[in-house]
Image: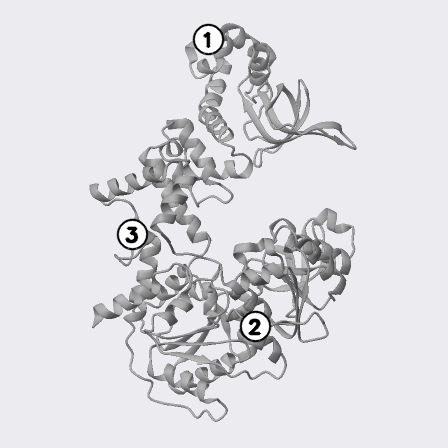
Amino acid sequence: MNTTTNFQDFGQILSMPCFDKITGYLIARTNKGTVTGVALNAAIGKSLRAIGEWVYHSKYGKQFKATQIDVSDPKNLNGYINFLANAGIPGLGQSYAKKLVDFFGLDVQQHLGNADDLKRAGIPDRLIPSIIEYHEKNHDKTEYNELLARSGISGKTATKIMEHCKLPELKRNPYALAGKIPRLRFKNLDAIHLQLHGDNRSDQRIQAGLMEAMRRANDKGDSGITYDDLLWNTAKLLSLDYYDIEGFIEEKQEDDDSLPIIRYPVDSPNLYSDDVFRTERYIATTLKTIKLPSLPKAIDTPNLTDEQRHAVEAVRQHPVSIITGGPGTGKTHTIKAICCLAEENGLTPILLAPTGLAARKIQDATGRDAMTIHRFLKAEEIDKNSLIIVDETSMVSLDVQAMLLKALQDKSIRIVFVGDADQLPSIDHGQVLKDLINSKQFPVTTLTKNHRVEGVEITRAAQMILNGENPDLPSDIAQECSFIQCEDDQIASIILELVSKSDQVLSPVKQHDAGTEDLNALLADKFNPNQDRKQWGFAVGDRVINTKNDYKLGVMNGETGVIRRIDKDLVQVRYDGGYKVEHKYDEHNLLLAYALTVHKVQGQEYPCVIIALPAHANILLTRGLLYTAMTRAKKKVIIVGNPKALDIILSGRWDGDRITALAAHLIDVSMSCQ
């Protein structure tokens, strides 16, 4: 049916068979038909406009399915009568509502809080307290709802905003909510500001735009942003001129230097928000102030390589040390030796990892207890006689690193950072492991010898990719490494044809051609055709991944399993560790796991990996991404993708190091201490 792109007037809301006050979802009967959509400020008698399309429902007939709804005060006397009669005011029905509207007309709401006015309109004394209470309770709420609705905010997002701050706070500075409410976009906060103040060049708006541009740089992985990029991105965000933004920055810096943006180092083109700058500085200062003597006792290491012995000796001699190396180079074997070194010297080795899955993996590999950094931070007491080993450090974010060091502050505990510096960095901003290595302030042992019998060709090809060289992979999938070349829109169908149930499919993207969402739908139908999926989103037998640590249930972010039972109350999953967990259906954090993004599988390994490589992934196509994806496989890698995507990866177009200052801070702090 026809879709409208402009608001269509539906007149008065006559009834609402369905209205959820939390989400704002409604089914409204109006003068011009039934409308479905979201509008928190909806009420019987109010006027409704909507954008959307007419659809035909098999049970309820013709309906207007709205993508956007605008609800406003009643436009006529009859609307106000219906509005007040259905407002839920005890004792106020149609007759008294009519009295009020007949007496005050369209200005009736202005008089509902005044007892004398209500008496003049003929309202009995017994009803007046209820009417005044209703007015006081709903006046600000109505204004709040309408302000949010006019700014394109509705549903749960609007509810969360109203829970988070009062209307006067929002009016004072709507931008204060930026980054604090899920799914609340900057353009909506900007719309609120422009509605209330109208000044598109106000200091408040430009400063908010600058901080939003900073946040967006952080969301892409950078701790900072270049001066030019900050100005251009802010100008585009606010629909202003580059020189408007430049003038604002210069004026602020000349006046009182109150702008929370810092250039570092002082001769650098890079700028950082004050909070990110302080976080990186804190990490650098804390690490460089750990002073400990060498451990007195060495251990026999006959079963270690020279590289591994060097790593263990570095841990013995230095309070902070780093071990890096690719898959199969013996990092876990070295960690076991470091644990023995700690115990020989009366220290307790504490194994930490950034995710629950990584913690469980290192625990299984070493036979020693391990935990996530987050769980460790909740410990009431941290033993000073400990040695901390952080595995998979490439995945650790700046904020988590800072929290860990804060927990260890003043305890002078020896720390070892372990990880593959060539893997993808944290999904959050920063690149902790790379910066620690690049600063050259700590001993770094790079393990290079591959100890695996299988996967030699995978390692060779992945290393060539990392160096920007084309490994010229064959199309024969019987080989250890292969590349089937095709267009983006052919990737999914080819994967569907060759994948087996034991293979793990990976993609750089969630959406569009060859994204995990589409691939999961196709693969679920292939391996587990079941109509229940339409009702529940899953079906018994589906492979799923848990996406959030749940210590109460004992299941970690990244753990995968198979659904064994599902109903309106619970989803039971048998996880790969052999244990069963019952998730509440309305509180689960499960996604289909037939296809996963590359970030989701860092630290994991599979016998065979099939990698979707669409060219439309563009800026996500880095050497590090393909290297990480390929090195998840132990025995076989099959790449199915667009040769243009491989060209982008090999060119290194999107590879450069992230904009960070941690390495510079470490060098600076080190020089200051000399």
Q: Nearer the viewer, residue 348 or 415?
A: 415
- Residues 665 and 345: in front is 665
**Amino acid carrying mark 2 in the image:** Ala
Instruction: Identify the element where label 1 is drawn.
Output: helix
**Given contact means CB atoms under 8 Å apart, are the residues at marks 3 and 2 in contact?**
no
Q: Residues within 10 Å of mark 2 (few under 14, many from 20)?
A: many
Q: Quadrant of the N terminus?
A: top right
In the rendering, at what x and y percent does residue 359 appear?
A: 52, 70
Q: Which mark is residue 119?
A: 1
Quarter of the image where the C terminus is located: bottom left
Whether residue 505 is visible to the viewer of this picture, yes or no, is: yes
| Location of mark 3 (residue) | 262
Q: CA distance from mark 3 to mark 1?
A: 62 Å
> Residue at the location (49% across, 41% down)?
184
Query: Which mark's residue is nearer the viewer, 1 or 2?
Result: 2
545 displayed left or right of 223: right
